[in-house]
Amino acid sequence: MYFLLHTFSLIPKSTRYIFNAQQDRKMEDNEANQPVNNNNNPAPGHHNNNPAHVVGEGLHAAHQAILQQGGPIGFQPYQRPLRFPFRIILLIGFMCVTLLVASLVCLTLPVFAGRWLMSFWTGISKIHELYTAACGLYVCWLSIRGATVLLAWMPQGRTIIMIKVQEWTLMILKTLVVALLVAGVIPLLLGLLFELVIVAPLRVPLDQTPLFYPWQDWALGVLHAKIIAAITLMGPQWWLKSVIEQVYANGIRNIDLHFIIRKLAAPVISVLLLSLCVPYIIAAGVVPTVGQSCLRV
């Protein structure tokens, strides 16, 4: 009952008249349907002529009144437009053509752009279409993103646009240098070291010369670099873990090129170069010299 009263209090004043009229009409109908009592005695269990209100009916009337807040809606005749079937067929036809053109552009444009870009590196050699499509999609996304950013910057004025372009250009150059060192040189040296220390002695006989493939060594180095970085971040606190966490916390927008080169790239590259060069110097320089000296003696 409290919920009914609360709901009734929320009804606007313009719609309460509809609710009251419906209640009065129901009360009149109930009084008319009651049997006539000749003895003028109240019926057992009833002390007045007002019927008991049903909560469900009142709530339904309240909901109907809420739905009709704006007043009753008049009759609106339906007028069928001219050439209605032809318009529906034309709409469906244009929808099919639009879907066809959109799917054709989404499937062919990225592949064409990816083929054109990858032809500068691979030449006439065939490449899997998945790689060309991925490259094309990424290039298209970058183009659309750049266009939207420029359109968003245009209301700010030419000076602000030039300042932001300079900032983004500097950030991109720093990112390219870091990517060249961290994602290019370090994985290549790491993969070459793994190839020389583990793979070549196991696969190549002593009387044969091993052949090295830089792309395969680089891919192998990327895999090992990811594993080493994950183990480093999971391990105890030491200088390499602190540097990696600091670089990750700075992100691309606040990239510190001097810090990355001095604290991360230079020490790791130095260790890898020493691991590659010292054994070669010993094997190609020290051992032959000592051997020739021993033979002369």
Image: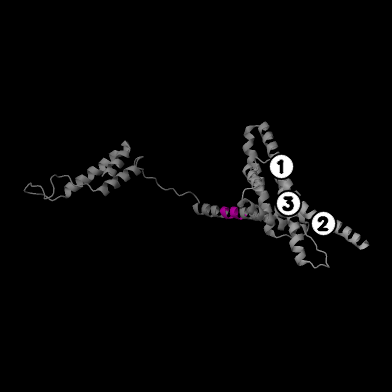
Which is nearer the eye, 209 or 154? 209
Instruction: Identify the residue position indicated by label 2 in the image.
Output: 280
Magenta span includes 96: yes
Q: Nearer the viewer, residue 238 or 228?
A: 238
Q: Nearer the viewer, residue 249 or 86?
A: 249
Q: Residues within 10 Å of mark 1 (few under 14, many from 20)?
A: some
Element marked by disc 1? helix
Residue 172 falls inside the magenta stretch: no
Q: Indicate the position of residue 131 as horizontal and vertical percent values.
A: 69, 57
Neighbourhood count class around disc 3 (C-alpha, 10 Å): few under 14, some 14–19, many 20 upward? many
Label 1 sits on residue: 174
Mark 1 belongs to which amino acid?
Lys
Amino acid on which disc 2 is placed: Tyr
Q: Using the rendered image of the protein, determine whether residue 169 is visible from the camera's viewpoint.
A: no
Q: Report, in whole angstroms, how far the alpha carbon at label 2 lies from the one at label 3.
A: 19 Å
Question: Can you identify the residue that label 3 sits on?
Answer: 186
Q: Position of residue 202 (x, y in %)?
A: 75, 66
Give the CA separation, mark 3 to mark 1.
17 Å
